[in-house]
Image (tube, rainbow, N blue to C red):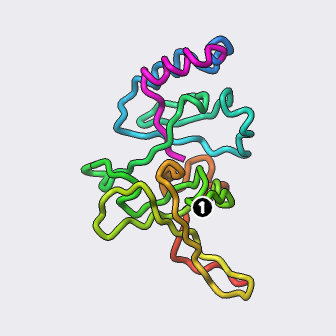
Amino acid sequence: MDVFPVTPQQLADINFRTPQLKRDRKINGKTEVMSRLDRGRAGYLVPLTEGVPPSKVPAWSVWCKFPPSYNAKMCVVTLRPCRQTDVDRHNPVAKCISSIRGRVIIIGPDVDGNKARLGDYAETIPPEDGQPTTFVNVRFPKERDFSGAVVQPTGRYHIVCLCRALNSVVPGAENRCHVTDFDAAPAEP
């Protein structure tokens, strides 16, 4: 999951609303340094081995890596989902994840309120005109239905329910984080 640290202004607001986080050292000097980083490049969460219980989200800390060489344990309330992607690594131009094909992770319900796909990877299906949209069509990896036929589930999500998840192996988590092939047929039963 690709993330940005909050801005200094957002961090000040978090400190004002939840001063206990600073007293408990969940927000510290490293958090302040990270909030002042260049906003042009996102970092990523070191893959979790378990989900974050909703009741513990405000004080939960996770390890993040920010290019080129920053590592930080950060409270999740000081992170924001990345919703932009670079079209070309050699000439980076930030584009909204809704306007370009790319892997995302589902972090909220679909437009019908269904939460069954939370945490699943999907691939955005950009509109034909390539313009950013508020509602995003996605496709999931192919699977087999009850009769054994290969199907490719799709969905529609508000952009705030999606977060960029680069489709590459995460160093140190190769066994947990695989590249997703959205065109591959599932294995035979």
Residue 76 lies in quadrant: top right
Outermost residue on the left side: it is: 91
How far from the left and from the top, in percent, is residue 83? 43, 47
Picture residue at 41% right of the left edge, 35% below the top: 68
Q: Going by the image, does 66 lie left or right of 131? A: right
The magenta segment is 1-20
Residue 70 is a magenta residue: no
Q: Going by the image, does 51 lie left or right of 177? A: right
Q: Which residue is mark 1?
A: 112
Q: Dot 1, how many residues are within 10 Å of its Cα: few (below 14), some (14-19), or many (20+)?
A: few
Magenta segment's dominant SS is helix
How far from the left and from the top, in percent, is residue 81? 50, 42
Outermost residue on the front side: it is: 112
Picture residue at 63% right of the left edge, 34% below the top: 62
Name the image quarter holding the C terminus.
bottom right
Give the answer, above or below, for where 152 lies relative to 12.
Answer: below
Give the answer, above or below, for where 58 lies relative to 152.
Answer: above
Q: Going by the image, does 169 lie left or right of 37? A: right
How far from the left and from the top, in percent, is residue 128? 32, 70
How far from the left and from the top, in percent, is residue 78? 54, 29
Picture residue at 45% right of the left edge, 25% below the top: 35
Residue 19 is a magenta residue: yes
The local secondary structure at tag 1 comes to loop
Picture residue at 47% right of the left edge, 65% below the top: 137
Q: How many marks?
A: 1
**What amino acid does circle 1 point to?**
Asp
Residue 178 lies in quadrant: bottom right
